[in-house]
């Protein structure tokens, strides 16, 4: 029996488009439905005894390649959703944070993001980090270049601290929808994480399934290279 603790959970929320397609709906409907799953999972994490941080991949630097109408829809959905969810952030005691280059978003959306961050800054049950316009290679390259510009030594410690995600290491990564790849998500921070891939599409993903995954994680043998 191992004694794993789960403090930092990360999720690649994938499969919204396929969920919609299966029902003969527009992909955008899948994104709308997927937003509800975010709420349920955040509530679960806020109520969970040991989870301190949940990082959710919501929009990658590669997602700009999608048709303009889908990208525009996602931006509007995010704006509307954040405003609408403020009471639930308060109710769950969840603090909202982001990683990624939100400077790439419209000033209006940036303002909404800043305002929700500010209004939830004191919540302590869980920190929900949305990865928005996030790409891990860019994050690492930028951190190295910042250190170099300042003439600082590049070490695991200094580079780790320079990343936009100076939070604790990720314990468990879950990806929904059956794809088994990282898609440029948190390459550095996932070095020693446990991975779990489920076929469930994100809009169908539930706290109950997450609980089963966590129970499985708790029994895994994490050796970190040592002999135990
Ligand atoms: C994940 O669902 C949401 C985003 C990447 C914004 P997808 O939109 O990738 O859904 P599939 O993979 O096409 O089913
Ligand atoms: C990864 O999903 C990005 C997010 C979940 C936000 P994608 O659907 O964009 O990734 P690929 O195209 O399957 O690698
Ligand atoms: Mg996808």
Image: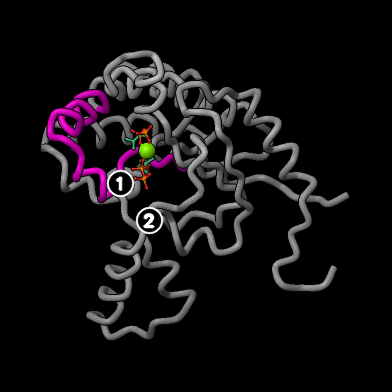
Instruction: Say which residue label 1 marks.
Output: 60
Q: Dot 2 corresponds to which residue? A: 184
Q: Main secondary structure of the magenta part?
A: helix
Disc 2 CB within 8 Å of nearest ligand 2 atom: yes
Q: Is residue 200 above or below residue 86?
A: below
- Whether 75 is among the magenta residues is yes
x and y, in percent, of residue 53 in the image: 53, 42
Q: For this rendering, which residue is in front, 68 or 122?
A: 68
Image quarter of residue 80: top left
Of 226 and 66, which appears nearest the observer? Answer: 66
**Element under disc 1:** strand
Quadrant position of residue 129: top left
The front one of 119 and 12 is 12
Q: Is residue 171 magenta?
A: no
Disc 1 beta carbon < 8 A from ligand 2?
A: yes
Q: Residues within 10 Å of mark 2 (few under 14, many from 20)?
A: some
Label whose residue precedes the other's in the sequence (1 or 2): 1
The reply to whether discs 1 and 2 touch (Cβ–Cβ < 8 Å) is yes
State the image coordinates of residue 120 (x, y, percent, origin top left).
Answer: 39, 31
Residue at figure coordinates x 74%, y 40% from the top left: 216
Q: Secondary structure at mark 2?
A: loop
Q: Is residue 219 above or below residue 114?
A: below
Picture residue at 39% right of the left edge, 18% below the top:
33
- Which residue is located at x 23 percent, y 26 percent? 79
Crowding at mark 1 (Cα within 10 Å: few <14, some 14-19, many 20+): some
> Over which residues does the magenta segment extend?
55-78
Q: Is residue 184 left or right of residue 172?
A: left
Q: Position of residue 149 (x, y in %)?
A: 22, 80
């Amino acid at each position: 029996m191992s004694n794993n603790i789960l403090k930092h959970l990360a999720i690649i929320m994938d499969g919204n488009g396929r969920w919609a397609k299966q029902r003969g709906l527009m992909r955008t409907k899948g994104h709308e439905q997927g937003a509800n799953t975010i709420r349920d999972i955040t509530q679960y994490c806020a109520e969970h005894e040991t989870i301190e941080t949940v990082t959710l991949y919501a929009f990658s630097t590669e997602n700009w390649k999608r048709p303009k109408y889908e990208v525009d829809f996602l931006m509007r959905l995010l704006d509307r959703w954040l405003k609408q969810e403020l009471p639930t952030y308060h109710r769950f005691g969840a603090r909202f944070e982001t990683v990624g280059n939100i400077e790439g978003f419209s000033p209006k959306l940036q303002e909404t993001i800043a305002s929700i961050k500010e209004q939830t800054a004191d919540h302590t049950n869980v920190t929900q980090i949305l990865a928005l316009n996030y790409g891990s290679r860019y994050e690492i390259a930028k951190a190295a270049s910042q250190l170099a510009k300042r003439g600082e030594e590049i070490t695991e410690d200094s580079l780790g601290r320079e990343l936009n995600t100076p939070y604790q290491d990720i314990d468990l990564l879950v990806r929904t929808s059956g794809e088994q790849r990282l898609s440029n998500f948190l390459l550095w921070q996932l070095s020693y994480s446990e991975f779990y891939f489920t076929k469930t599409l994100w809009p169908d993903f539930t706290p109950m399934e997450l609980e089963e995954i966590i129970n499985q994680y708790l029994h895994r043998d994490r050796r970190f290279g040592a002999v135990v």
